[in-house]
Image (cartoon, rainbow, N blue to C red):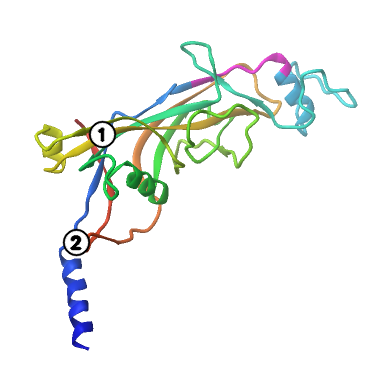
Amino acid sequence: MRRALAALLLVLAGLGSAQIWYYNVDQDNRFDPPTLTFRPSALELMCAGLLEPGGTPAGGATVSNLTLPAGCPAAPPVVVYGTDPNTGDPVYATVLTVKFWGRRRANDRTYGTDALVRVIKRSYALQVDASGDLGRVDDQFLPPFATPPAAVPPLTGAWTGWQASQTISFADPQISNVQNFNRRNRTCRDLYNDRCWTAVFTWVLPVRLVLHGNESGRAQLTLVPGLFVRRTATTLGVRGGAFEEPELKPYAP
């Protein structure tokens, strides 16, 4: 009985001195390209008009019992992928790049990059704001943020229509530019008063335009990354005998 009471008091004492440690998010994160331009061809517009119920092909003609032109898919949807407006290159997915800061060393089992990946996948999503021709066309994305490189179409999964604002969860990132610093580094002192590390995490997010037979001309979509937001309830875990709760905290260098 005394031993059980002593153990309980130790746990309560640990709760009273609980620490929260932070992974810091550099706020210079971005999409590349941030804007996608969709340029449906005349054939694609015609295919959508023929395949979609109630649709009409480009030009407005009503067609029935017509063999589909060569190049049309056998069934809807008719899908168009974007192009980079600066280069004209085809873009199947936009690339999200985020720089993180963490305490101690990047290979630390408790505070390093692998631990951060687990936290992000389990508990966080990114707020993404979208603008452009959202109300006029059916722009879609394929969550979650995926591991690079971008897959080549056709892509399958639960495609989701863009809204003005949404939160998107994460799969594993690609990790690069890992650097470790000693505690004399000014940022390490400011953030952790300890050694620290930085790393760049990269994800891809497939994006497409679905045609329904009533579109005309090109469409554009612009994406802006916002804050990392919790998507699960807060939980406590035991680390080194203390109750600690990792969080992501914005950092503007």
Which type of secondary structure does the marked residue at label 2 adopt? loop
Categorize mark 1 by other alpha carbons within 10 Å: few (<14), some (14-19), many (20+). Answer: many
Residue occupied by mark 2: 18
Which type of secondary structure does the marked residue at label 1 adopt? strand
Please, is residue 85 above or below residue 121 in the view?
A: above
Please, is residue 242 above or below residue 58 in the view?
A: below
Q: Which mark is residue 190?
A: none
State how many labels appear: 2
The percent position of residue 208, horizontal first and vertical second, equals 58, 28
Q: Is residue 137 visible?
A: no
Instruction: Give residue 73's quadrant in the image.
Output: top right
Q: What is the magenta range? A: 36-43
Left or right placement of residue 236 versus residue 165 in this view: left
Residue at 62% from the left image edge and 33% from the top image edge: 155
Q: Nearer the viewer, mark 1 or mark 2?
A: 1
| 209 in the magenta segment | no
